[in-house]
Image (cartoon, helix red, strand yellow):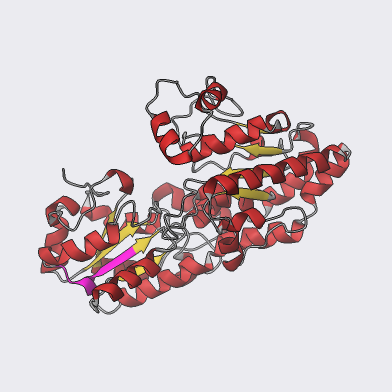
Amino acid sequence: MPIKTDPTDLESSRYYALENFNTLLRQVDVPNCFSNIRGEAAHLWQSKHHVGEISDETLKLFDNAVYVSYTYLSYMEWSPRQNPENLLEPDVIKQVVNENKFLVVDLTHEGWSPEEANVVVTLHEVLPRAGIRHDQVIVMSGNLKEKEQYDLWCKRKNTHNKMHLFNFTVFDSGMFMCLEHPIDHLIHQRQHTLAEKYEDGKYFICLNRAPRPWRQYFIYKMVKAGLKQHALISFDRIAKEDGYWEWFKEHMSIMDIDEIQDVFKEASIVDIRDFKVNQANNISFDIHMKSLFTVVTETQPLNFNNTSLFLSEKTFRPNVLGMPYLVFGQKDTHKTLRDFGYKLFDDIFDYDFDGIDDTNKRADMLVSQLKSIENDLQSKTRTQQIDWSLNHMDKFIHNLYQTENNYQSVTAINDILSILQTR
């Protein structure tokens, strides 16, 4: 079955590329601003933040490339045996080959390991059969381990013909672009509204939409530890007959499956009742103001032998809201955030769990820490609890600007623009 790319309308490809880069291009042409949304949204954003537009010179560079985006990578058949026509629309192949254009492949919205979906190797092996040279291909990957894995694969294969590959985080800039107010408005607003909106005894918020086995395991352990009474935890119901549980039993090694199923026999509603709608682009300010800190359950906690690391909008939302947060994600998630320049909340959180290899043990250590935090907060007055949450203004502001600037991806964008200039 052919793998469909998005968009199929090639006329809109370069503008779609700019949209998907979110706020990254702003540092190339318009420092400290947002300018890459088309149409009325662009004018609205520019009027709010007093910014300019992407220069025609930069836009013209994208005439040198054809842009395609792949999503839901794990559900496709990624194999070097694929036909090129199953990976790319015929018109895309024609433009790249006949007009000697670059092919920009966007994988930024997924972070799957090559052990799960070997996309990059598939592209490397298949595209030359369509007449597309490796040096014509620019790959943008949301897997922060992708370049390292691709370089290792090329070394094992003793190949020096390589595609251009860049690791990206687009969801930090994407979350920032959802702001409707000037840069630090929400942080200062939270300083003034938490005392009014904080629900006594609801220390943290943990929102969960899509049921995933590791997510359900973590929720179950929190419920079993008695944390639900002191938290705002949302999750959908899962029927016992759902085939989902077979995967759970296979991968999570849980014996008391009946007890876990009992936890999820009814949905737990915190904000919305429709768990089908993805809330990735919502800041959800009001609901987050009801608690002191956020516990994030990331898209993927398994790192597949250290071949995958992915940060979605869920991790970056607290930085925009100005909240302390902990992430149940892949190993070394917090270490990666620190390496990227974010400031962690070492004065109130213990990040020892972050470096644990075993996913279940990492979850268990985080639950134990949440229990310790719960005990500590119970000994404080309401005012002291709020102060415990708010007394990090320097870190909130620093992390918000870090989210805005997205230095690691902006560097990659500049490198890509340099490559496009060679045509």
Give the left or right position of residue 223, taking residue 357 as reference. Answer: right
In the rendered image, the vertical position of residue 199 relative to residue 17, given as above or below = above
Residue 94 lies in the magenta stretch: no
Viewed as shown, does residue 406 lie left or right of 162? right
In which image quadrant can residue 81 be found?
A: bottom left
Asked if residue 266 is positioned above or below residue 121 in the image, the reply reads above
Q: Residue 10's spot in the image, x, y percent?
A: 21, 54
- Which is nearer the eye, 319 or 353? 353
Given residues 401 and 129, the one toward you in this image is 129
Using residue 394 as the reference point, say whether residue 12 is left or right of it: left
For residue 247, which quarter of the picture? top left
Query: x and y percent of residue 253 in the render?
Result: 48, 38
The structure residue drawn at horizontal position 27% and vertical position 79%, both measured from the top left corner, is 422
Q: Which residue occupies 47% across, 47% down?
A: 300
What is the span of residues highlighted in magenta in the rendered image? Answer: 132-139
Q: Is residue 56 visible?
A: no
Which residue is pictured at 87% across the width and 41% down the height? 383
Q: Would you identify the image quadrant in which residue 92 lies?
A: bottom left
